[in-house]
Each structure stands twice: as structure tokens, then as C-alpha cells.
Image (cartoon, rainbow, N blue to C red):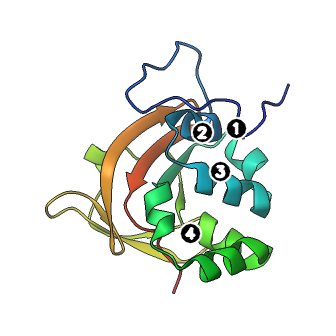
Amino acid sequence: MKKTLLALTLGLGTAFTAQAKDIVDTAVAAGKFNTLATALKAAGLVDTLKGPGPFTVFAPTDEAFAKIPKADLDALLKDKAKLTAVLTYHVVPGKVMAKDVKAGKVKTVQGSELTLGTTGGVTVDAAKVVQADIAADNGVIHVIDSVVLPK
């Protein structure tokens, strides 16, 4: 049974139920990833991130997406190939908790490498992890403050 993408809109402070949720349901439940959810749907990646994984997702918030000029974001949402590349650049295979992050390069699902930093908190390219280790039954989400783009 598939849940609709916007089935839950709980605040981050709300306790999650004991029932495990996949990465998509966990992100939607947090209430701060509406643009990400829309982008995942537009790119056809919802079923992938509901799959077995495990995945580590560096998830930009709605505020992070708001840093992109509206015309550029609208164009990105209409270009499925480019949107897929950007979104999969935010995903690393495996479940990597914040305490296990090592500074250096890590290969993304998109195929390029992200640069991770650990000085003064975890960074992903130029983005900062503002909330780490949001567990899902098929991986983990680390919230970032900017959208990162493949080079």
C-alpha cells in the first residue's frame, strides 16, 4: 500500500511512532522538506528512496531550496534529467551516522564525489549539517542548510 507523499506533516519536535518509516516518509513527517518531496516526485525517485537501501541522504530543507532563485528552481523541477542528477548527488550508498563521517571525498549515487568535512561540525561541499542522524528504517537523513550541486 503506497502512502501519498504528503500524507504526514508533523513538526520536527513531534515524537515519531514506533512504526519504522522509510527515508521519504521520515522526511515528509518532519514537515521541513516539502520542496525536496516535490522534487523527488518530479524526478521519479520516491520509490527508489522507499526501497531497501540503506541510504544516507543529505537533505536540504525548504529554506535551503529557497536560496535558489525561483526561476532557476522552477527550471530545475521541469528538467527531469538534471533534477535527478542533483537529487542523487545528495545520496550516498550505505548508512553513515554523523559520528562515522570521515573528512574527504565520498562517491554519491549520482556518480560524482561529495567533499565531507568534520571541522566545526559536518559539512557537505559548501553546506553545513544542521541536524544529524534522523534514523529511517532504510537509512539515515542528515539535514543540510544548502542545496549542493554536482560539479
Q: CA distance from mark 3 to mark 2?
A: 7 Å
Tag shown at residue 89 = 4
Residue 128, image x, y percentages: 30, 62
Task: Check whether the beta carbons of the residues at disc 2 and disc 4 lie within 8 A of each other.
Answer: no
Q: Is residue 18 left or right of residue 145?
A: right
Residue drawn at (52%, 12%), measured in percent from left and top?
Answer: 18
Task: Check whether the beta carbons of the residues at disc 1 and disc 2 lie within 8 A of each other.
Answer: yes
Tag shown at residue 37 = 3
Q: Is residue 112 left or right of residue 83?
A: left
Counting residues from the N terminus, which is met first, the one under dot 1 or under dot 3?
Answer: 1
Front-most of residues 10 and 60 = 10
Callout 2: SS: helix
Say which amino acid is labelled 2.
Val
Closer mark to the observer between disc 1 and disc 4: 1
Quadrant location of the N terminus in the rendered image: top right
State which quadrant residue 23 falls in. top right
Residue drawn at (69%, 72%), measured in percent from left and top?
Answer: 83
Say which amino acid is labelled 1.
Leu
Tag shown at residue 6 = 1
Front-most of residues 30 and 96 = 30
Q: CA distance from mark 4 to mark 3?
A: 15 Å
Counting residues from the N terminus, which is met first, the one under dot 1 or under dot 2?
Answer: 1
Callout 1: SS: loop
State which quadrant residue 133 falls in. top left
Front-most of residues 20 and 112 = 20
